[in-house]
Image: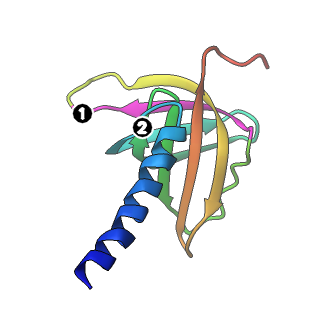
Amino acid sequence: MESKNKFIFDDFYSLLKYAEKRRKFHRIKCDIDVTIRNHTHPIQIQAKCIDISLGGIKIKMFSYNKIKLYANDIVEIWIYLENNDKPMHRWGKVAWFKQTDIALYRGGLYFTTEKPVD
């Protein structure tokens, strides 16, 4: 019985390793404050970065207001690192954004290399 359970977990972990290998950049779990200003639809939100990579960030936020971020929206991102007076500034685009609970939203933003043209 013990060996049968071992094989189940081996398959599970191999699937997890495969999913991470498909990613272009390694993700690092974090809990960092971010401010996001949407240039496509005028809105500014406060959120938490829950993982970060060289390619982008994953965010979560709590709000009872309907938040509207859509795929391919152009955003300006300020990442507030600990022990740093000045936030890190990046431009990006929304990869995905959805409401996952009554007051919880999650989303993925990827970094772009230059400021978008208006």
Task: Tell me where residue 91 sits by quadrant.
Answer: top right
Which of these two is toward me, 17 or 111? 17
Residue at image mark 2? 52
Tally the numbered discs. Answer: 2
Q: Is residue 57 magenta?
A: no
**Spot occupied by residue 61 in the image (x, y as percentages of width and height):** 48, 57
Q: Which residues are magenta?
A: 72-82
Q: Residue reaching furthest bottom?
A: 1
Horizontal relation, residue 48 to residue 102: left or right: left
Dot label at residue 56: none
Which amino acid lies under the numbered mark 1 shown in the image of this protein?
Answer: Glu
Whole-percent x, y for residue 58 in the image = 49, 46
Name above or below for residue 43 compared with residue 16. Answer: above
Report the disc number at residue 82.
1
Q: Residue 59: where, in percent of width, then height?
A: 49, 49
Q: Residue at x 37, y 26 (%)?
A: 87
